Image: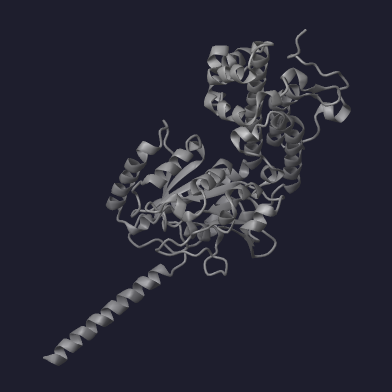
Amino acid sequence: MKGTVSICCLLSLLLLQAAAEEEEDVSSVLRDRSHIDETLRLATEEKAKDYAAALERLRKIYHTSIKPMEQAYKYNELRQHEISDGEITSKPMVLFLGPWSVGKSSMINYLLGLKDSPYQLYTGAEPTTSEFTVIMHGEKIRSVEGIVMAADSSRSFSPLEKFGQTFLEKLIGIEMPHKLLERVTFVDTPGIIENRKQQERGYPFNDVCQWFIDRADLIFVVFDPTKLDVGLELEMLFRQLKGRESQIRIILNKADNLATQDLMRVYGALFWSLAPLINVTEPPRVYVSSFWPYDYAPDTSRELFKREEISLLEDLNQVIENRIENKIAFIRQHGIRVRIHGLLVDRYVQTFKEKMSFFSDPELVFKEIVDDPDKFYIFKSILAKTNVSKFDLPNRDAYRDFFGVNPVTNFKAMSAQCSYIGGCLLDKIERAITNELPALLSSINSGKQPGLSSCEATGCGEKPKNRYRKN
């Protein structure tokens, strides 16, 4: 009797071992990655000289036409977004966000083919990524400390110093020679853990995320079937994504872990969870697949997952192909905001001077103006005199804080911001917005080499006109 029981136990153990080995064999089969190189066209050579010339022209327009007004009216203290040369010339940034252990790092390993390489990102079932990891192109494989990245002015990460030394210790860069990284930069972020407070991280996590969100060209928000609940930290993250809906892509990862019927239920539950957080007419695109190096699980919707993966790669390729156009559009949008800010500050200055008399208290006069700008038609006058849209006007309350730090007497009126050699600040930024940047965009689309504007090539030789000076 005992011998029979022993034999049965032995057979059960052998069957379990065989099943485990079979499961291991299935999971160890690596997926074919040839479609990644094909979809992203990594075999084709880039027009490096054309891109370099366009970026240099863009940098020159920014420094000569937009930055002077930005500095004169201290725009950076209103928006806290200073544009560096590194940001202008940087590659498109793809940002990965989402809960912990949903496959963000595995997805980057898969896209770059880092499986079993010394520099593959560490993955696991527990929260593994505690740093902001920037994966970028380099001549050789090496890691770069956060303090080095922030100190290097040629990179676009120098503004991150403002988040403190504790954060820089949580920032790491990985450089490697890779065709895809020649065209794009990946940023892996720590997973969102709902039971962790901001103070426990030791740095302003949401502010750091906002910095990367503002500069990302494509934002992948990754979920898996086991982590669909929305807590306070994830809700805050989606608030920060407001206004960037066109860059957001939702990814339901590890989809081959579910049967088709269960996958449909999870897909609906994901939309149910996210619906209150995304208040737009057209929801972001959702990709359903399994993004890791191993083959899909058997008896799952392999063809569907493969098509979804190719669609995502085409989306990524679109960002890469349009990177110069997106950069020009970004600088032009920035220029429009700087111009509006300059006009508003000028209007505050003019109103203050008009209301001041010999016996007036300057502080009380300006407090009345800044507390109720509509009473003095500050914003309405800008809409009436210029072609500014009311939807582009900044928050009125922001100027109360702005002038609290920067006294109105520190600023000159727009009519005084002219010189015979340099011209007028307003004319230069309007010329950049309406002529120079659109012309540069047209030259990129038509394939022409971007060159100098007619004034820069020959010299306009005429005295600058100031349409804001009173006759």
Residue at 51% from the left image edge and 40% from the top image edge = 247
Residue 142 at x, y percent in the picture: 64, 65
- Residue 408: quadrant of the picture: top right
Residue at position x 56%, y 24% in the image: 392
Q: Quadrant of residue 454?
A: top right
Q: How is the image coloured?
A: one colour
Residue 57 lies left or right of residue 113; in this view the side is right
Where, quadrant-wise, is the C terminus in this rendering? top right
* Of 15 and 154, the residue lying toward us: 154
Residue at image location 69% in from the left, 26% down from the top: 433
Residue 287 pos. (x, y %): 43, 47
Looking at the image, residue 182 lies above or below residue 6: above
**In terms of depth relative to the viewer, which is nearer, 469 or 399?**
399
Relative side of 231 to 440, left or right = left
Q: Is residue 144 left or right of residue 101?
A: right
Residue 191 in the image: state x and y as whole percent. 45, 54
**Which residue is at the front of the view, 408 or 50?**
408
Q: Is residue 43 visible?
A: no
Residue 263 visible? The answer is yes
Q: Quadrant of the N terminus?
A: bottom left
Total labels drawn: 0
The picture places residue 154, in percent across and down from the top left corner, at 72, 50
**Image position of 315 with respect to 435: above or below:** below
Q: Please, which residue is most extreme toward the left here?
A: 1
As drawn, 467 above or below 308: above
- In the image, farthest residue toward the top: 471
Answer with left or right where residue 121 lies relative to residue 68.
left
Please determine whether, in this image, residue 321 is positioned above or below residue 140: above
Which residue occupies the foreground of this view, 200 or 206?
A: 200
Q: Residue furthest front?
A: 359
